[in-house]
């Protein structure tokens, strides 16, 4: 203030000029002090973010539970709230023709490729409040930190947060409506898909003052030349990070998936009169096949060899292979009747597509063998297949560095007292669940950061994330953006 007092009073414009310069110089310092002065930004990245997660978690179409589906009334209310948070972070906002919410900061005449950060705002029925929402709000909070510390103006490339309108696919049984539209892979035929009430996607878009036309759908698409990368923060939806006592992990890829339906026909009969040796029981065959699948996926090398099967089986290639029978139906399903038919579903996921395809082929062959042994008729129907999505190696390395820096700084400040591996290697995980990053990989290179959740529980109101883990996720994003999009020299000069 001494500098101001020494200025001549006859030049008030000089006072104003120096006051403005002084304020610009002090703003990052004062903001840092207001945020705790330790560079961890707890008030924004933890306290405010957690409050916003709770606020968004109360915006629901259901009474007493969380449900927010594609362009539902609750989704529209949530959009307005998310837009207000984006504006608070200094972002320019808009809603595209698929209902996605965008918040972007871009310097004038910038020609560089954008960094996109996002996740989905829709939920399953009876959902938890972190799935999807954490990725959106953490990204907004990270950019707010850049704003209040003066680094937003020093971005070297556009940075954009996207809240995708639909990922779960609850309403129209079609996943990735929002992100696939941005990636340019959503077919025009999607407009005619109906929900259970007979309302089409096109109807819903028009009801919400969107055009709902093929041309409008094309306008949502981003050109690959305009996007440099996409990053997504998401709860792990699994138990690994909790077992490791580590708050964050980077994702090496999203597993490919195959869904099968196995149909077994036998001889229906009386439970008390048909001798055991004369039965053609499809239920017993199904039970044996379920156990066969479990053994095949737990110990594939007992069934497969490197040379004879696919030439691809190594310990690394089969890591993360998981197989599930999620549904089993019998006919006529009576306690005193030997079933005439049993159907069951099979879900096979693996990071290595060759492994997955070989497991599918091997299980299909084993089905026919076991059914022949038991004198029942079997068929295997292929219902769905999706290739694995690898995350970009460079982005993954950058996210690892950002995570190590985050954990180190928080552990030093005793902000993460329960972390076992502070300063050690960041866990590298495979995602068995699908994410918007799968759709965005058709547009640009992608990276993902997982956040620990209690018990690995997701798609449930029991879904839970520690407040300090929310904080760690936000700080890791700040560090990542600093690496990728902030002029380091200018930022250092401003903060010194």
Image: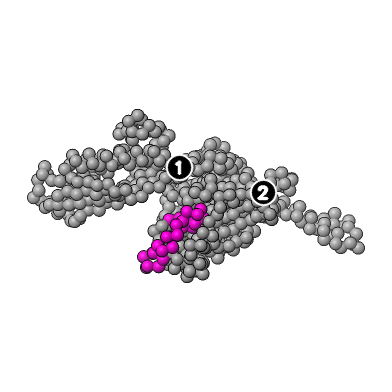
For residue 430, which numbered disc appears in the image? 1
Q: Secondary structure at mark 2?
A: loop
Q: Does the magenta run of residues contain 196?
A: yes
Q: CA distance from mark 1 to mark 2?
A: 31 Å
Quadrant for the C terminus in the image: top right
State the residue at coordinates (22%, 48%): 264
Q: Is residue 254 left or right of residue 47?
A: left
Decide if residue 456 is in sight here: no
**Circle 1 Cα neighbour tier, 10 Å, few/some/many (<14 / 14–19 / ≥20):** many
Q: Secondary structure at mark 1?
A: strand
Of discs 1 and 2, which sits in the foreground?
Answer: 2
State the residue at coordinates (57%, 55%): 161
Residue 82 appears in which quarter of the rendering? Answer: bottom right
Viewer-side residue, 409 vs 436: 436
* 21 shown above or below 394: below
Of pointers 1 and 2, the one earlier in the residue sequence: 2
* 153 shown above or below 319: below
State the residue at coordinates (46%, 56%): 186
* 436 shown above or below 403: below
Which stretch appears magenta? 175-200
Residue position marked by numbered label 2 in the rendering: 156
Q: Position of residue 46 (x, y in %)?
A: 57, 53
**Circle 2 Cα neighbour tier, 10 Å, few/some/many (<14 / 14–19 / ≥20):** many
Q: Is residue 472 left or right of residue 385?
A: right
Q: Position of residue 119 (x, y in %)?
A: 51, 54
Residue 63 appears in which quarter of the rendering? Answer: bottom left
């Amino acid at each position: 203030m001494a500098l101001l007092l020494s200025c001549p009073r006859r030049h008030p414009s000089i006072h104003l000029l120096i006051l403005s310069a002084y304020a610009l110089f002090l703003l990052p310092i004062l903001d840092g002090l207001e945020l705790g002065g330790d560079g961890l930004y707890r008030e924004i990245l933890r306290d405010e973010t957690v409050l916003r997660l709770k606020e968004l978690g109360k915006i629901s179409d259901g009474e007493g539970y969380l449900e927010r589906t594609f362009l539902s009334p609750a989704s529209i209310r949530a959009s307005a709230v998310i837009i207000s948070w984006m504006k608070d972070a200094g972002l320019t906002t808009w809603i595209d023709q698929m209902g996605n919410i965008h918040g972007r900061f871009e310097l004038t005449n910038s020609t560089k490729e954008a960094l996109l950060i996002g996740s989905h705002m829709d939920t399953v029925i009876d959902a938890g409040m972190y799935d999807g929402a954490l990725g959106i709000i953490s990204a907004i909070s990270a950019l707010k930190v850049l704003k209040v510390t003066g680094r937003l103006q020093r971005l070297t490339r556009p940075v954009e947060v996207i809240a995708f309108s639909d990922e779960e696919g609850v309403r129209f049984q079609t996943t990735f409506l929002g992100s696939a539209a941005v990636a340019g892979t959503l077919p025009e035929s999607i407009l005619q898909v109906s929900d259970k009430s007979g309302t089409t996607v096109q109807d819903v878009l028009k009801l919400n003052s969107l055009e709902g036309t093929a041309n409008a759908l094309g306008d949502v698409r981003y050109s690959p030349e305009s996007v440099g990368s996409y990053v997504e923060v998401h709860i792990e939806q699994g138990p690994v990070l909790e077992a490791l006592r580590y708050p964050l992990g980077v994702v090496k890829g999203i597993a490919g998936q195959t869904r099968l339906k196995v149909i077994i026909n036998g001889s229906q009969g009386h439970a008390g009169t048909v001798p055991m040796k004369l039965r053609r029981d499809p239920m017993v065959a199904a039970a044996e096949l379920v156990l066969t699948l479990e053994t095949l996926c737990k110990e594939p090398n007992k069934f497969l060899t490197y040379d004879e099967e696919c030439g691809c089986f190594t310990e690394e290639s089969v890591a993360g292979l998981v197989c599930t029978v999620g549904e089993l139906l019998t006919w006529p399903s009576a306690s005193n009747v030997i079933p005439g038919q049993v159907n069951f579903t099979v879900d096979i996921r693996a990071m290595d597509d060759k492994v997955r395809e070989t497991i599918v082929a091997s299980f299909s062959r084993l089905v026919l063998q076991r059914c022949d042994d038991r004198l029942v008729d079997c068929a295997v129907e292929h219902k769905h297949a999706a290739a694995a999505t690898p995350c970009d190696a460079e982005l993954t390395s950058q996210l690892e560095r950002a995570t190590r820096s985050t954990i180190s700084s928080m552990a030093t400040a005793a902000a993460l007292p329960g972390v076992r591996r502070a300063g050690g290697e960041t866990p590298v995980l495979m995602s068995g669940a699908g994410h918007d990053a799968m759709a965005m990989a058709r547009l640009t290179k992608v990276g993902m950061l997982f956040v620990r959740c209690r018990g690995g529980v997701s798609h449930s109101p029991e879904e839970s994330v520690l407040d300090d883990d929310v904080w760690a996720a936000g700080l890791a994003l700040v560090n990542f953006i600093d690496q990728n999009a902030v002029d380091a020299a200018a930022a250092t000069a401003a903060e010194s």
